[in-house]
Amino acid sequence: MNLELNNKYALVCGSTAGIGKATAMALAAEGVQITLVARNEDKLKTVLSELPQQRTHDYIVADFSNPEGLKSKVSDYISNHHGFHILVNNTGGPKGGPVYSAEVDEFESAFTQHLKCNHVLVQTTVPFMKEEGFGRVINVISTSVKQPLDGLGVSNTIRGAVANWSKTLANELGQFGITVNNVLPGATGTERLTQIIKNKSAKSGNTEEEAANAMKNAVPAKRFAQPEELADAITFLASERAAYINGINLPVDGGRTKSL
């Protein structure tokens, strides 16, 4: 299938590891020109050197705890280089724990890193998408949008807010040839999953292997996802072929989510 992505530019956030890095690799393999975004310049340079070199890729150093700083850096980049057809919103999730015991600051921090940063990036990139008559905004969220996950109280709360923001945007932007969709990862082989397994092991007294196996057994596929499997779903949603898919929440979780 020809995804018709050769002439496109993409801004991929959180792209030095995990799902973000895998997405940058997958899009680049389809001929997309990638601009990576993360806060660690050394890691950005490493990923940049690993991207398929069909086109000239680049990066922006930015911290998602500072939405206005992020907006300024991306705006400057667009002014001096080019706009983006594809925006992949992706950043690390909040720390775990029961929602009842969460500090107010934890909600504020997560809201800033996820919803505020997503919003300023949309405001910065959508004008170019409108000019081109083509745009893809893809938010990497969590299956907790459909089914809250135990021990991830702050994350469950903020992810739901992002999903509703995204659906509203999809309704507003669809007329311009811009789609807005959410990909909902299940348990995926990333650094965050490693930390979740360690926390479960510490709380339960089980070994990390036992904690991991218990999580796998809750998935009909009986395994964790690989970041590349999420990246493939994101790449399809970014393509011309997905033009009539808009405003959805797509679980990529091996069937773990119980709801329809």
Image (cartoon, rainbow, N blue to C red):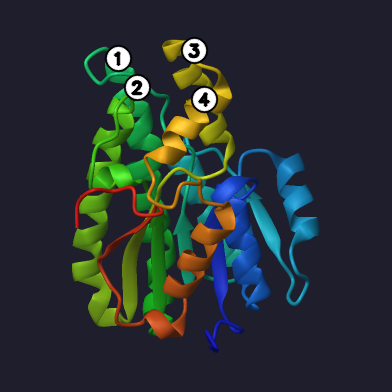
Q: Does 100 appear above or below 74?
A: above
Determine the residue positioned at 61% across, 57% down: 22
Determine the residue positioned at 71% across, 66% down: 57
- Say which residue label 3 marks: 202
SS at mark 1?
Answer: loop
Query: Closer to the N terminus: mark 3 or mark 4?
Result: 3
| Residue 65: image tag | none
Q: Residues within 10 Å of mark 2 (few under 14, many from 20)?
A: some
Q: Which of 146 and 128 is in front in this view?
A: 146
Q: Does 112 appear above or below 257?
A: above
Q: Does 129 appear above or below 138?
A: below
The mark lying in front, picked from 2 and 4, is 4
The answer to whether residue 81 is visible is: no
Q: Residues within 10 Å of mark 1 (few under 14, many from 20)?
A: few
SS at mark 4?
Answer: helix
- Measure the C-alpha gap from mark 3 to mark 2: 22 Å
Q: Where residue 146 sits: x, y (%)?
A: 23, 48
- Say which residue label 2 marks: 106
Determine the residue positioned at 41% across, 30% down: 94
Q: Where residue 225 sits: x, y (%)?
A: 51, 51
- Say which residue label 1 marks: 103
Q: How crowded is mark 3: few (under 14 residues within 10 Å), some or many (20 or more)?
A: few
| Residue 210: image tag | 4
- Measure the C-alpha gap from mark 3 to mark 1: 22 Å
The mark lying in front, picked from 4 and 1, is 4
- Measure the C-alpha gap from mark 3 to mark 4: 11 Å
Q: Which amino acid does label 4 sit on?
A: Glu
- Left or right: residue 225 versus residue 16 is left
Q: How many labels does the image show?
A: 4
Q: Given contact means CB atoms under 8 Å apart, are the residues at marks 1 and 2 in contact?
A: yes
Q: Where residue 240 sits: x, y (%)?
A: 44, 84
